[in-house]
Amino acid sequence: MEQHETMSVDVIIIGAGPAGLASAIRLAQLTKTNNIELNICVLEKGSTVGSHIIAGAVLEPRSLNELIPDWQKLGAPLNTKVTSDAFWFLTRQHHYKLPTPPQMRNHGNYVISLGALCKWLAVQAEQLGVQIFPGFAAIEPIYDAQNRVIGVKTGAMGIDKNGMKTKHYQPGINILAKYTICAEGSRGSLTKMLIKHYDLQQNSDPQTYGLGIKELWEIPETQHKSGTVIHSVGWPLDSATFGGGFIYHLDPNIVAIGLVVGLDYQNPYLNPYAEMQRFKQHPSIRKMLSSGRCIEYGARVINEGGWQSIPKLTFPGGLLVGCAAGFVNVPKIKGIHTAIKSGMLAAENVFTALQKDSAPAELTLYTAAIHNSWIAKELQAVRNIRPAFHKGLWFGLAYSALDTYILRGKAPWTLRNHADHLQLKPATNFKPINYPRYDNVISFDRMTSLDRSNVNHEENQPPHLLLKDPAVAININWKVYAAPEQRYCPAGVYEILQRNDQAYLQINAQNCLHCKACDVKDPTQNITWVPPEGGGGPNYSGM
Amino acid sequence: MKCLVAIKQVIDPYVTIRIKADNSAVETNNVKMAMNPFDEIAIEEAVRQKEAGKITEIIAISIGTTACQETLRQALARGADQAILIETNEQFGPLQIAKILTKIAQQQNPQLFILGKQAIDDDCNQTGQMLAGLLNWAQGTFVSELEIDDSTKATVVREVDGGLETLRLTLPAVITTDLRLNEPRYISLPNVMQAKRKTLQVIPLDDLGLNLCNNIKTLQVTPPHARKSGVKVTSVPELIDKLKNEAKVI
């Protein structure tokens, strides 16, 4: 075994997103008020803070107010107040205004770039003495003899595509910590290992996901209404598929537009990317984007499981925060406020534990803190809405209205979630979908869009999308499901090609946007996403 | 032997360049920035010379906004001993930059000043040459090999049009790096940590007391024409016909 360099810190946080940075900031604040020194480190696989961050996003500032009450004075990038809310039902040609459900009312909220907010949070954290290391991925937890997590390993750099060391080889290092806070976001690879290792999901429903695809457009000032927030259901998705669109106008002259498709869809011919391109061609939307230009593109899976899918939150030596746990409020379409709040609660419990317990202990008090917080109240009340859409859009909408207006979230039952990858049906049950051609004005082919995500990976490195059994890709994925990964991957990573009359799966790993859709949706869970060499991936700037 | 290395912050080479809607400049707001790749080679070379015992101290210098500190931290993580930021919000051309670097060289008295041969944003390829002229030092440009013979002499191999040219320079000298000089290594996590503790001095440009006037004005920045989509031809005669009669290239 190769000897790895080791360094020790008090707390290691995996991921510089809103949950991770809120944890870091809250911990650092507590060290200041109590006059205690703590070594707090944040690892981030993106090349800079914010480069892998993507969200809608409308921010409910509740938890930011709690974390940094004077954020306004400190110049937080909350520049666009929501001025109007609309909820549209779309048909191919028209839009009908539906009453905006109370969860979707955004008075007092802000349209933001989450990437910009994270960059700002990182500056606040560093000023408090937190050390942030972008460009370094945590690849696996380190366990001690008592089966406790005592830190993480970072990935090696400079290994070629055959797994051999190049002359630039740099081994990973072991970062030992008293506590490890997992803030990787939705479907984190380290979190996935921990959930499996400690069987954290055993008493909860499977986690479910949606795939969000987003673009930023710069549009003429005359078409722009700052603070406009529009959500849509219906077209282009069929009524059996859960999902919807969002359109947010933010300063200066930017429109954030996107489509979220529930990954429990059944038709393997469904192509979320093509649905998104079609969505923009709706007459009401096309009008908004015309004479504009698309400046950024990205995609990411979003947790949709809600309260009943939240895994056990703690294990010896660490805990899960934010979307690594899955605190998204689906009807609100928001998870940043809960991510920040969960990070703060985690930090408070880690801080208390560091004062008395012999680390690494299991911080079950954190779970109690979540259960006693407004996060639990919010998520419990809306827990039945997403699963009600298993029966289609119309049942879902009707049930949501009943649940929201009559039962007021107090239904004595809980609807269950199902695992997304098990919902796909064999291709023989469906006909291929004929998507319209891209016009290169409003809709674009996948490679043109991908260029706008500024994705980059060192090419000479081992693939980071692993097949447990390469034969399954052809014998099951291709033969039974018509290789759905060719369509659900928003980055065109997967292609079925022919060589000597034999079909094979080509994996273009350098295109990968780190969205994790394949890790979620692959019907036999044959695809595993692992972190590539640190710094690889998209380089989002305003997402 | 003391060595100065000039560092420019540029838009990350892997980011797609976008022009501002009013055609006034390239959009840099919120865009990921990085160290100019030729400057990475420059700092790597200085570090290798230090590892070989030829150089004792490396100082990285950048001129620009406070955001350039991030790039200087990278230089420190790559192995520079200390860094200096000459802070200014103004944009300068090569001559003004060379004048500022001249002032720093006069203060620091290095034996070697290494720069990237050009920055990938403006592609000027002038600063090193101007700096050598202003200092009245020897210069070795487009260098693909550097050998420091002793404290007074260095031998360089230059990439010139016809092949390679070997020169012996009297120190102090200005060196500008070509692509083949070296391949920069990965930055390790412990080195990033150490870099946070190294000295990064910020000096406002006005403190240098230089009289700089920018004599270049950018009138307009426009993107190249978008490539038209191609057509598939069915036969060689059709291809030749199109090349002859449509494209008129043969």
Image: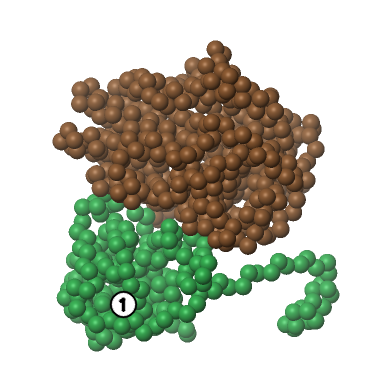
Chain colours: A brown, B green
Residue A175, percent across and down?
31, 38
* Residue A357, image x, y percentages: 23, 22
For residue A478, side relative to residue A99 (left or right): right
Q: Circle 1 marks a residue in which chain?
A: B
- Which three-letter amino acid code belongs to the residue tagged 1? Ile
Q: Residue at x 26, y 68 (%)?
A: B87
SS at mark 1 in the image: helix
Please state, as top left, top right, bottom left or bottom right, where the C terminus of chain B lies in the image.
bottom right
Q: Nearer the viewer, residue A491 or B58?
A: A491
At 49% from the left edge and 16% from the top edge, which residue is drawn?
A203
Question: Left or right of A487: which side holds A168?
Answer: left
Instruction: Give residue B242's quadrant in the image.
Output: bottom right
Label total for image: 1
Q: Is residue B45 above or below residue A347?
A: below
Counting from the top left corner in percent of width and height, residue A407 is at 56, 18
Compared across the picture, whether A25 is left or right of A438 comes to left
Quarter holding residue B43: bottom left
Name which residue lies at 24% across and 72% down. B205
Using the image, determine if residue A414 lies above or below residue A155. above
Residue A387 lies, with reference to residue B198, above or below; the image says above
Q: Residues within 10 Å of mark 1 (few under 14, many from 20)?
A: many
Residue toward you, A326 or A492 = A326
Residue in the image at 65% along x and 59% along y: A290
Task: Return the residue at label 1.
Answer: B97
Q: Front-most of B20 and B139?
A: B20
Residue A384 in view (yes/no): yes
Q: Is residue A233 above or below residue A289?
A: above
Question: Is residue A534 visible to us here?
Answer: no
